[in-house]
Image (spheres, helix red, strand yellow):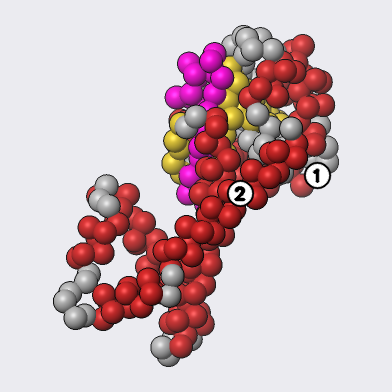
Amino acid sequence: MKIAIIGAGNLGLSIAEGVLHSNGATSMYLTKRNIDSIKHFEKFGNVTVTTNNKEAVKNSDILIFAVQPLHIAKLLEEVKDLLNENHVIISTITGFSIENIEHILGKDHNIIRSMPNTAISVGKSMTCICANTKGKKRIELAKAIFNRMGHSMEIPEEQMQAATVICASGIAFWMRLIRATTQGAIQLGFDAKEAQELAMHTCDGAAGLLIASGHHPEEEIDKVTTPMGCTIQGLNEMEHQGLSSSLIRGIVASFEKISEFKKENL
């Protein structure tokens, strides 16, 4: 695959690293206004670092746009005359719809929106993907790219805002739960470093169990709860204090906020 990442900032470079370390590109272009900080990527041999977006588009088949939202419209206008029907256009821009992209480029292009999260930098992203009518034919290609950096799921575009809350904001929600577990462990006598290590790896193990087994969380909870035991005592106290309802209310509040942003930008 000949890949260009237009906008090699933090997200763009995380994608680049995931693709390159898994040998997922025959060639790659990385573009940025100031390339000094990314010149070291040329050590891979098949990577060209440049400030020239048009050069990158001309020499690539898959175009991943990872620029800031205020720059995307101007950038698409800059390169649209270089695009052909075989190009696959993948946008990582939050809030910039497929309709917005089609308004600039036209509908006769493979247009895909993706929503990775920050765990992409460690190959653990949950990435949601949607496409326009023509782009549906290339959705598996996009999934293959992002599956190199975690897991991907195709969803309808109208669910992208909800996915942003669950997957992108969700990283922060899970971090807060890990922090709380760490604080509890400190109160029980572990030092701060030990407490965080216990919390992190237990969280990782819980997710790993569900991913490997496909079980519902309650099925795994049942395995560690015994009648009149300490686990059910702790779970019941958490529920009495509103653990589940607080999480759900937080998720809904986050979604309501992102929905306000959309209305303001219409």
Q: Magenta segment: does it hold 162? A: no
The 10 Å Cα crowd at callout 1, few under 14, some 14 to 19, many 20 or more, is few
Mark 1 lies on residue: 36
Work out whether mark 2 precedes mark 1 in sequence or the reverse, and give the earlier one: 1
Instruction: Give the SS element for disc 2.
Output: helix
Q: Position of residue 247 (x, y in %)?
A: 48, 61
The N terminus - image quarter: top right
130 in relation to 108, above or below:
below
Residue 247 visible: yes
- Place residue 88 in its image quadrant: top right
Q: Which residues are magenta?
A: 118-142
Residue that sits furthest to the bottom in the current view: 189
User: What residue is at 81 percent from the left and 20 percent from the top?
Assistant: 78
Q: In this view of the protein, can residue 50 be seen by the observer?
A: no
**Residue designated by label 2:** 256
Residue 90 shown left or right of residue 208 in the figure: right
